[in-house]
Amino acid sequence: MPILHLIILAIIQGITEFLPISSSAHLILFPNLTGSQDQGPFIDVAVHLGTLCAVVAYFWRDVRRIYTGCLGLSKGKIKTKDECLALCLVIATIPAILAGMVIKMTDFELALRDNVALIGAAMMGFGVVLWWSDRKGHSKKSSYEWTFKEALILGIWQAIALIPGTSRSGITITGARFMGYSREEAARLSMLMSIPVIIAASTLAAIDATSNANFALLREGALAACFAAASAFIALALMMRWLRRVSFTPYVIYRIIFGAFLILWAYN
């Protein structure tokens, strides 16, 4: 793949991974819109690992809490808030892993990835749901009040994001807003939930992808990961600052416009 296309792809992944506008929709459609070759699973893994580094770096205090909580869980303890947070993340990850395994085993993934009209409809439909939750949701709760029941429910919301165009961050933010979390706290929960999901998905994908990797591909993957990490960190920082003053409406407007374009493109 040309270096310029690789850099553009990594930047797209970095910007869209944590914004509620669906990174998968942009990544799937990039080769079709530009006429370039598909980036392949190895580059997908690399850019996701780059975004993982970004979210860990930005929320390093929360990640430290999660690490401490995981140590406690490994000893069979569920007493502190850190241990509860770590267990909540485990619970929230299970539905997405189970749903992903079902889709993988049934080869339904390819059908979803190739359906541009479905991607456009998901962009528009779930964008409207995000707007509704942001308008009707309360802003009273913080991430420290996250319960096991809410973690499971948010995990189910997250599993819906396996439909391309839904946006993992968008759908989990939607669920958290319906539960009464503030915009910032809903985004925080969504970002923390991305950590185990990206690790799990990247691990599974890496098993298949690395078997065909060579030095040139490894070099391209490292470059893509660096650009994805940098762009993701910037996008994440700007979004979290943005949410202190502005709603999710601008993202919803973008989703509706982009989704309508995709549907028109699919049928023409």
Image (cartoon, helix red, strand yellow):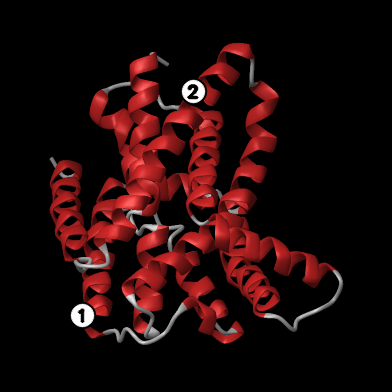
Kindly identify which residue carries mark 2: 223
Q: In the picture shown, does residue 227 fall above or below 81? A: above
Q: Give residue 9's quadrant in the image.
A: top left
**Residue 149 makes an appearance in the image:** yes
Extreme-right residue of the structure? 75
Residue at horizontal 23 percent and vertical 66 percent from the top: 248
x and y, in percent, of residue 152 in the image: 57, 78
x and y, in percent, of residue 257 in the image: 13, 53
Name the element at disc 2.
helix
Q: In the picture shown, does residue 198 fall above or below 65? A: above
Specify whether 80 is left or right of 226.
Answer: right
The amino acid at mark 2 is: Leu
Quadrant showing the N terminus? top left
Residue at horizontal 39 percent and vertical 66 percent from the top: 187
Q: Give residue 207's quadrant in the image.
A: top right
Name the element at disc 1.
helix
Kindly identify which residue carries mark 1: 135
Residue at horizontal 33 percent and vertical 27 percent from the top: 8
Q: In the picture shown, does residue 231 fall above or below 171? A: above
In 3D space, how far apart are the residues under numbered discs 1 and 2 (Cα atoms)?
40 Å
